[in-house]
Image (spheres, coloured by chain):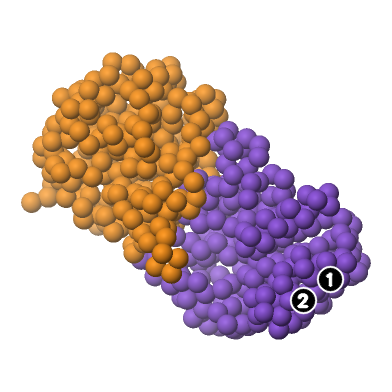
Chain colours: A purple, B orange
Amino acid sequence: MKSREYAKVIRQEKIAPDVYSLWIEAPQIAAEAKAGQFLSLYSADKSRMLPRPISICEIDPDRGYIRLVYRVVGAGTEEFSGLCEGGRIQVLGPLGNGFPLKEGKAFLIGGGIGIPPMVQTAKELSAIEDRSSIQIIAGYRSEQFLAEELKHYGELYIATEDGCAGTKGTVLDAIREHALEADVIYACGPKPMLRAVKAYAGEKGIECWISMEERMACGIGACLACTCQSTEVDNHTHVKNKRVCKDGPVFLSTEVEL
Amino acid sequence: MKNTKVTLAGVELKNPVMTASGTFGSGAEYSEFYDLGALGAVVTKGVANVPWPGNPTPRIAETASGMLNAIGLQNPGIDVFIERDIPYLKRFDTKIIVNVCGKTVGDYCQVVERLASEPVDLLEINVSCPNVKEGGIAFGQSPHALEEITKEVKKHAKQPIIMKLSPNVTDITEMARAAESGGADALSLINTLTGMKIDIYKRSFALANRTGGLSGPAIKPVAVRMVYQTAQAVKLPVIGMGGICTAEDAIEFILAGASAVSVGTANFADPYAAKKVAEGIEAYMDQQGVEDIRDLIGAVG
């Protein structure tokens, strides 16, 4: 049986404008979770009925902790940003499929608030691969966050829109500037970035796993709100609509239309 | 001995709590949280004669104490439903109510005919979905069209039929009487209220479909009023829904005249919501010294 639980807030800090890092204690979730999965966070204010899906940034199974890094984009995430040590929040998870980690030289591409899941992805990859094979490309609008954590597990390349750090431009500009190569790609970020990464992977013939985002209601595959267009018939409705929350959020780039 | 059983068109439910169509799939996802045998019935998501892909995304938007949805009745069609979903639901000690949708009268009839030999208890005919261009609400906003489709579906249905009414009408009692005249065995209401949300920063519609159905506690007082009016207007049993989150909400509907209630949007806010409502009704009965749930039906005033 799945269960929803109250997680204890260990600590929370603001790590960039509107970006918060929240450590919670949720031993069962921490024991099961893996990179690329997400949690549903429920608002204490009952007038906000829908859970917020937040990707897992880091897992500490020994202490039973989960780290969530999210951006405040509305009233729900604003409420979460006010959580303090000792507080509690209702969570459900881990949800979704996660990244299937493969051996070989990898690109871990994160854009904006798609960067956090790359921390756990890099951490898990570091158990099976050399540091030099873990090439992390992080794209920021301007201000950077999680750079230290990412550097800890792999080679970090930064791209910023305004050129304040690293390559001025996109994550693909950074890959080209450094003439990087990979056998497999893991990516999470805004749709235009995913579209460009998918096209790049297609040209180069690289296996590419992308994490999708869509508005969700139930978070468990029942309501069919968060579908994305798939190239093949899905196994739920037998049309071409995969559920981001249940069949994803991670898909092979050739599996989905962007 | 306390009684929580209610009867709908000759079908006995162990308790009056069921799920609102579209919020619970065919039960599989929620059965990972609790035994569906805790519920009086599971009402499935709408099923058509063939698979429907549904609407473009975004399909949902949160609103104050509720949400808008425009899923567009994405469903796998009756073949997959019969092969996969009905056998799954049969594993649980609960009644099965299949919500039926279609674009034409013929589509509805085809689905109810396919279900005739299946082990389902009741059929709920969805003539009130506001999110599809053809069928759906087109049959649910004209008393004449509603009476005609009720008659047609009734001819082809083996199980009793529940007509699910739209609140997007001038007079709900006129619609309820039309369904009764057409031969409906029960009524369920309310479906969602048509609404709209605009993103003021993007200056665009929050939903790809522009409009969507409003559900959740925000619509509960409207629903209670319509259930009351309907129960007064017809002799058919009424299934009440619209924003039910707690047992207290459910009792309100029952006092207004509902013989059973459905929990919908609350399933998203809490996967255990429907089970908790069923348990809470028993607690209310114990606390209030109610021996038989049926004594509460329409007992307001």
Res B6 → quadrant: top left
Q: Which chain letter matches label 2? A: A
Instruction: Work out whether A199 lies above or below B138.
Output: below
Tell me residue B257's x, y (percent): 17, 43
Q: Is residue A91 left or right of residue B103?
A: right
Tell me residue B237's x, y (percent): 21, 34
Spatial CA span between label 2 and label 1: 8 Å
Q: Which chain letter matches label 1? A: A
Instruction: Work out whether B255 lies above or below A65.
Output: above
Q: Is residue B147 visible?
A: yes
Instruction: Work out whether B78 lies above or below A84.
Output: above
Viewer-nearest residue: B37 or A90: A90
The residue wearing badge 1 is: A177
Q: Which mark is residue A167?
A: 2
Viewer-nearest residue: B208 or B292: B208
Element on which disc 1 rests: helix
Q: Mark 2 and 1 residues: CB-CB less than 8 Å, in contact? A: yes
Q: Amino acid at mark 1?
A: Glu
Q: Amino acid at mark 2?
A: Thr
